[in-house]
Amino acid sequence: MFSLIQAAGWPIWFLIITSLVAVALIVERFIALSQRKILPEGLAEEVLLLARNQQLGNENANRIAQGSPLGKVLAAGIRARSGGRVATREAMESAGRLVAHQLERFLPALGTIATVAPLLGLFGTVVGMIEIFHAQGPTGTNPQQLGQGISTALYNTAFGILIAVPCMIFYRYFRSRVDGFLMEMEQAAARVADALTTGQKP
């Protein structure tokens, strides 16, 4: 491993640091975007049951809000239900925007790494090309410097692409996952909002 880093030259350190950050972001998002953490099974049904039994007090609303992002959205509607259908939906939409922002956390950074990694690889390629030109001297070619320049150029290009491709794949995957969560959350919130405001004036 050390010999590979040595062959790639000092520009490879930028890519190594970038790859470590990318791995940390991917692992964090895998853990954070768990289905059971975002959309606990049966939570909407529990809220509907509490609504039918008229047990939606502040204590239950606080408990529901602390459990998950979906719970925060539903609890916002519970607290605003006395204001009517429009107020309930607006409260849920406002909470939903905040939740969406939290779910998309670190995704822009991952997308940025997918874009920047090939550019860092290109930077290493340019450094390698400069070393290749410097290997040409009045007295002939320096084989060691020529070989170092070629390896620097090739290794950095390959490593930059190697980082960018998985980052872009995971970025798209997480974006799709967040969009799916938000759609399911919206459907659950609409069901709960209708149940909370049945019989109320808008």
Image: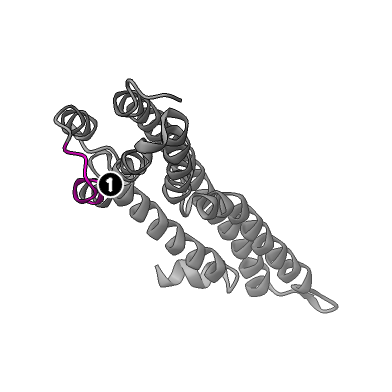
Left or right: residue 191 versus residue 116 is left
Q: Residue 25 or 139: which is nearer the viewer? A: 25
Identify the residue under disc 1. 68
Q: Which segment is the magenta one?
A: 55-62
The residue at 58%/55% (across/down) is: 117
Measured from the top left, where is residue 80 in percent x and y? Answer: 38, 41
The residue at 53%/55% (across/down) is: 109
Left or right: residue 57 versus residue 23 is left
Taking the magenta stretch, the answer to whether it contains residue 181 is no
Circle 1 SS class: loop
**Crowdedness near tag 1: few (<14), some (14–19) or many (≥20) residues, C-alpha within 10 Å:** some
Rendered-image quadrant of the N terminus: bottom left
Q: Residue 179 or 94: which is nearer the viewer? A: 94
Is residue 198 depicted above or below 77 in this figure? Answer: above
Measured from the top left, where is residue 186 in percent x and y? Answer: 40, 30
Taking the magenta stretch, the answer to whether it contains residue 56 is yes
Measured from the top left, where is residue 124 in percent x and y? Answer: 65, 64
